[in-house]
Amino acid sequence: YWFSHDIVQEAAYKIIAYQEREAFHLTIGRELWKSFNDIEDLEGHIFIILGQIREGANLISYQEERNDVAALCLRAGELAICASSFQTASEYLLLGVTMLGENCWNDEYDLSLELYNAAAEVEYC
C-alpha cells in the first residue's frame, strides 16, 4: 500500500497493537518473499524483504526457515558489498549469523562458513 502522506502511514501503523508489530512485519516479509519467483526480481527487492523479516526474526521458530533467511542474508550482504555499502552488508551478514542454529557447523557447514567469512571480511572494509 502507498500512503498519500507520511503522517497517514504513521497513523495506520499505530493502529497495529505494539505486541503484534513483530508478527505483522514477519508476515509481510514472508509474503513478499513468496511473491518473487524470479531470482532477479527477488534480488531487486531483497533489502525490502529482509527489512520486514528482520523486525520479526526472533519469532521464527523453525530452523529450516531460519537457515533460509540466513542464506537470503548472505545474498543481501554480497549485493551490498558489490555496491560498496559495507555497513549495510555487515548488518545483513550479522543477521544471517544470528539465524544459524547451535549446530550450524554440522548442519549447514557451507552456509555457516560463507556467512562467517563474509561478516569477518566486511568488518575490515
Image: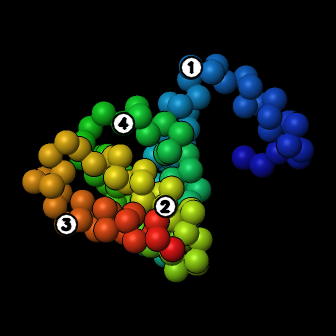
Looking at the picture, which amino acid does disc 4 mark?
A: Ile
Mark toward the start of the polypeptide (3 vs 1)? 1
Give the image location of residue 123, x and y in percent.
Answer: 46, 65
Q: Residues within 10 Å of mark 4 (few under 14, many from 20)?
A: some
Q: Nearer the viewer, mark 2 or mark 1?
A: 2
Residue under label 1: 19
Among the 4 quarters of the image, the one containing residue 21: top right
Q: Quadrant of residue 28?
A: top right
Q: Depth check: 72 or 5 in front? A: 72
Number of the front mark, 4 or 2: 2
Q: Where is mark 2, residue-wise?
A: 90
Query: Residue pushed farthest left?
Result: 106
Residue at the location (64% across, 19% down)?
Answer: 17
On screen, residue 109 above or below 1: below
Residue type for callout 3:
Asp
Give me the residue at 58% from left, 78% from top: 83
Residue beneath label 4, please?
60
Spatial CA span between label 2 and label 1: 28 Å
**Element type at mark 1:** helix
Q: Disc 3 and disc 1: Cα gap in Å?
A: 36 Å
Q: Earlier in the sequence, mark 4 or mark 2?
A: 4
Q: Residue at x 77, y 31 (%)?
A: 12
